[in-house]
Amino acid sequence: MRKSWTDERLDDLSVRVDTGFAQVDSRFEQVDSRFAQVDARFERLEEKIELRFEHVGVAFEQVDKRFQQVEARFDKLEGRFDRLQHTRVQVSLTMLGSVLIALFFGH
């Protein structure tokens, strides 16, 4: 078999191997190019997602401020109800005391 391999055939084989590797290199370059395109698309998508999350974060901060305002108003309202209940107890005790005084000392 060695005898059938001439220099010319070896040169042809060498050219075919070089051409094959050049084609493989070209395909890898295409794949690399596509990966670069995919990477760029993912980067743009990540930027959009981050921007959306920032908007969501701002919206939650605004909602939190509104809840704090509502909570403060409920605290004020609760204080008013506490004062009203305290006043009602004072008035009731005063009236009860007046009735008791009238019953014991009124005759």
Image (cartoon, rainbow, N blue to C red):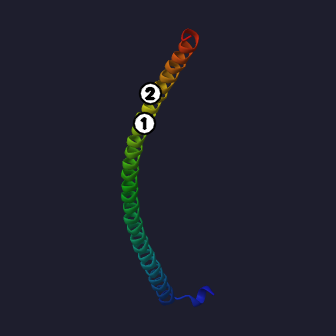
20 over 74 or under it: above or below: below
Marks 1 and 2: which is nearer the front? Answer: 2
Q: What element carries label 1?
A: helix
Front-lying residue, 52 or 68: 68
Q: Farthest residue toward the right? A: 1
Report the side of 1 relative to 54 (left or right).
right
- Which label is found at residue 77? 1
Amino acid on which the number 2 mark rests in the picture:
Arg
> Percent from the top left, x then y, of residue 43?
39, 63
Residue type at mark 1?
Leu
Residue drawn at x 56%, y 10% is 107
Q: Name the residue under label 2.
A: 83
User: Is 50 situated above or below 3?
Assistant: above
Asked if the residue under mark 2 is in contact with the one under mark 1, i.e. CB atoms within 8 Å, the reply is no
Position of residue 77 in the picture relative to residue 89 (left or right): left
Front residue of this view, candidates 8 and 38: 38
Residue 64 horizontal/vertical position (percent): 41, 45
Callout 1 environment at 10 Å: few (<14), some (14 to 19), or many (20+)?
A: few
Give the vertical position of 19 relative to 34 (above or below). Answer: below
In x, y percent, where is residue 44? 37, 65
Residue at 51% from the left image edge and 16% from the top image edge? 98
User: Which of the pair 29/103 is nearer the observer?
Assistant: 103
Quarter of the N terminus within the rendering: bottom right
Cα–Cα span, label 1 and label 2: 10 Å
Q: Which of marks 1 and 2 is nearer the N terminus?
A: 1
SS at mark 2?
helix
Q: Assess disc 2: are there few (<14), some (14-19) or many (≥20) residues with their C-alpha within 10 Å of its C-alpha.
A: few
- In the drawing, what numbered circle is on residue 41? none
